[in-house]
């Protein structure tokens, strides 16, 4: 599959398509992270603010800064209840607009594979976190069947289609995450898998949600009608419904955390 740019500009569409998945994984992630209250947080690649809102709701932070390159995503994030505390601004994960040691915790939620140079993104999080602070991330296992949109991607691949994929998918593997965290000098590095399950009202709900993906939507809607119908039926066959017509399936993320040396 080709590595083409994927741009997330519609915050509401992203929230419906991926924000729900992000919150499901984020709840488990924060339980595992178990951060102390009253910390200064930076959410790198905050997108629509789904994870940022979890931090505000659950972690009693004193400050949260959300950074993302997409103004469309940030507009949506600024409309969340989390905006009562969180500040959202445009920024580059590889050149964070903050001084060294500015925060107590830095996190990337479902972002690392989109950073052109993942090691630089991790080093920037380390730079802006104070000694003793935490640098963490969770990312769908993009290469080993963990991505929520895999039911569609697998069938597209079987039909010879090549939708855009993130540029650094290998960074989602657990061994790659460990190398990035230890290579950046972080201590007490720990990892875990996070598996979450989402239920859709029916197949049409699942399909309409999947088409909100900026990678898949344009590719599928641009297909000839017969190819689009064939793809839809192939995906439907992969996702059997329950007695009520609901579609439920699991996605898996790899998570990591480490401590900045004192």
Image (cartoon, rainbow, N blue to C red):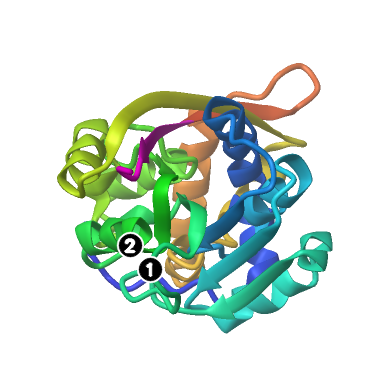
* Quarter the N terminus occupies: bottom left
Judge by depth and name the residue closer to the eye, 207 or 74. Answer: 74
Would you name the residue on which mark 2 appears? Answer: 127
Q: Quadrant of residue 185?
A: top left
Instruction: Tell me if I can see residue 163 in this picture.
Output: no
Residue 236 vs 103, above or below: the answer is above
| Range drawn in magenta | 252-262
Left or right: where does residue 125 sit relative to residue 243?
A: left
Judge by depth and name the residue closer to the eye, 142 or 176. Answer: 176
Instruction: Give the mark, 2 or 1, whose residue is nearer the N terminus.
Output: 1
Left or right: where does residue 108 sit relative to residue 191?
A: right
Q: Residues within 10 Å of mark 2 (few under 14, many from 20)?
A: many
Judge by depth and name the residue closer to the eye, 165 or 254. Answer: 254
User: Residue 191 location, x and y as percent?
Assistant: 35, 27
Would you name the residue on which mark 1 appears? Answer: 100
> Overall secondary structure of the magenta stretch?
strand
Residue 244 vs 108, above or below: the answer is above
User: Residue 122 location, x and y as percent?
Assistant: 30, 56
User: Residue 196 location, x and y as percent?
Assistant: 57, 27
Left or right: where does residue 32 sit relative to residue 116?
A: right
* CA gap, disc 2 and disc 1: 5 Å
- Count of numbered labels shown in the rendering: 2
Instruction: Tell me if I can see residue 16 in this picture.
Output: yes
What residue do we see at 61% from left, 73% from top? Answer: 73
């Amino acid at each position: 599959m080709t590595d083409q740019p994927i741009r997330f500009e519609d915050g509401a569409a992203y929230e419906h398509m991926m924000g729900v998945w992000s919150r499901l994984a984020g709840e488990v992630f924060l339980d595992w992270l178990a951060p102390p209250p009253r910390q200064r947080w930076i959410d790198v690649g905050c997108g629509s603010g789904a994870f940022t809102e979890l931090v505000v709701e659950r972690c009693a932070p004193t400050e949260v800064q959300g950074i993302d390159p997409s103004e469309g995503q940030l507009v949506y994030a600024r409309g969340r209840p989390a905006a009562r505390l969180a500040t959202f601004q445009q920024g580059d994960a590889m050149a964070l607009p903050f001084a060294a040691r500015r925060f107590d915790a830095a996190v990337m939620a479902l972002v690392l594979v989109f950073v052109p140079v993942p090691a630089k993104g991790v080093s920037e999080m380390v730079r802006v976190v104070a000694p003793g602070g935490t640098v963490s991330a969770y990312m769908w296992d993009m290469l080993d069947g963990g991505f929520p949109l895999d039911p569609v991607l697998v069938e597209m691949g079987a039909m010879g289609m090549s939708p855009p994929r993130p540029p650094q998918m290998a960074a989602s593997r657990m061994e790659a995450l460990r190398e990035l965290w230890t290579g950046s000098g972080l201590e007490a590095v720990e990892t875990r898998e996070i598996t979450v399950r989402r239920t859709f009202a029916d197949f049409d709900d699942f399909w309409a949600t999947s088409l909100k993906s900026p990678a898949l939507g344009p590719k599928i809607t641009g297909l000839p009608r017969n190819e689009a119908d064939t793809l839809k039926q192939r995906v439907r066959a992969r996702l059997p419904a329950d007695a009520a017509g609901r579609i439920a399936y699991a996605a898996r993320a790899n998570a990591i955390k480490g401590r900045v040396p004192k």
